[in-house]
């Protein structure tokens, strides 16, 4: 079986758990649970996370109980799957919480890190090299005999002196150039990006190259977020960096819709509500577990 996105595994675990709570002695459902957990450690951890999340669900009014329990359990599983993996925690040399921070290196290079961003520093005497493990970062690279390289997902970026952003949004990986030039490499292919150009890759859509006003790139540094035809899910992922828990979108069609506009990241809940309202969706807060967006 091909690898599934972690969010899909979390949703599958939540659905299975909910059906088991309704009919706990059903041998068919018990067998389905055993088969699900036997698929691998990821599935087993997802199911256990949902089970633990269940203990925190408070009773609701009778006619509302089932929908709220379903949402809370689904979010509990997704929150676990979206939390910082142990590998990321161990590898990250620099990480931020729910606010941006600036890192100035001994080489005078500067890295502006968005909220909930993690970086690994693999620099040595021959090269300056970083891996973006999560979130978004803006690199201002100074001239230096050592090349400057950044890895994000399957993409590698090589520069000499420039200003550019890398970002992971939902299941997409992005590189955008404010000034100078970078070389982006992916699967033995390479692209030259100059000022205002953006490169996006996701498993679903492949490679996309767009142009943006340079001032709109990494706008999170000014606590605003400029959306130029982003997928709804990718826009939500940027706002989600400033929120506790995780944000779960309960509709694939909604997640894939394009959105444009500007929201204020000073108030991430209001930003999320504004974004959701633009697509006729609602935002449901579930305390420390996080947030759900539903049509």
Image (cartoon, rainbow, N blue to C red):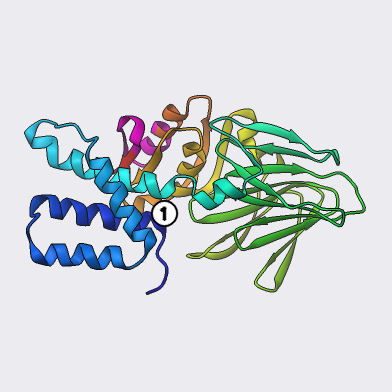
Quadrant (top left, top right, bottom left, bottom right) of the C terminus? top left
Task: Determine which quarter of the picture holds residue 41.
Answer: bottom left
Horizontal and vertical percent position of residue 175: 66, 53
- From the viewer's perspective, tell me whether residue 189 is left or right of residue 142: left
> In the rendered structure, which segment of residues is drawn in magenta?
273-291
Tell me which residue sits at (28%, 58%) in the image. Answer: 12
Tell me which residue sits at (17%, 67%) in the image. Answer: 31
Magenta stretch: includes residue 281? yes
For the residue pair 55 and 165, the one nearer the viewer reads as: 55
- From the viewer's perspective, tell me whether residue 170 is left or right of residue 64: right
Residue picked out by circle 1: 256
Task: Determine which quarter of the picture holds residue 282.
Answer: top left
Horizontal and vertical percent position of residue 57: 21, 35
Quadrant (top left, top right, bottom left, bottom right) of the N terminus? bottom left
Q: Residue furthest top?
A: 266
Tell me which residue sits at (20%, 53%) in the image. Answer: 17
């Amino acid at each position: 079986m091909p690898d599934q996105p972690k969010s899909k595994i979390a949703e599958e675990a939540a659905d299975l758990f909910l059906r088991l709570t309704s009919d706990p002695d059903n041998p068919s459902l018990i067998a389905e649970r055993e088969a699900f957990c036997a698929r691998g450690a990821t599935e087993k951890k997802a199911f256990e996370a949902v089970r633990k999340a269940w203990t925190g669900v408070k009773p609701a009014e009778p006619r509302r109980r089932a929908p709220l329990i379903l949402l809370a359990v689904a979010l509990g599983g997704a929150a676990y799957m979206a939390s910082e993996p142990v590998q990321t925690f161990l590898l990250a040399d620099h990480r931020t919480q729910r606010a941006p921070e600036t890192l100035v290196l001994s080489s005078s290079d500067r890295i502006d890190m968005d909220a909930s961003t993690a970086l690994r520093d693999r620099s040595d005497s021959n090269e300056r090299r970083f891996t973006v493990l999560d979130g978004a970062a803006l690199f201002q690279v100074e001239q230096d005999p050592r090349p400057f390289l950044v890895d994000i997902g399957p993409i590698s970026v090589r520069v000499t002196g420039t200003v550019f952003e890398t970002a992971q949004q939902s299941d997409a990986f992005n590189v955008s150039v404010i000034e100078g030039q970078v070389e982006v490499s992916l699967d033995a292919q390479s692209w030259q990006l100059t000022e205002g150009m953006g490169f996006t890759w996701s498993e679903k859509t492949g490679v996309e190259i767009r142009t943006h006003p340079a001032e709109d790139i990494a706008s999170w540094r000014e606590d605003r977020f400029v959306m130029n035809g982003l997928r709804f899910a990718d826009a939500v992922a940027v706002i989600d960096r400033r929120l506790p828990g995780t944000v779960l979108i309960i509709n694939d069609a909604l997640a894939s819709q394009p959105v444009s506009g500007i929201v204020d990241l000073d108030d991430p809940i209001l930003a999320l509500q504004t974004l959701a309202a633009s697509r006729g969706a609602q935002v449901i807060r579930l305390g420390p577990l996080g947030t759900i967006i539903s049509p």
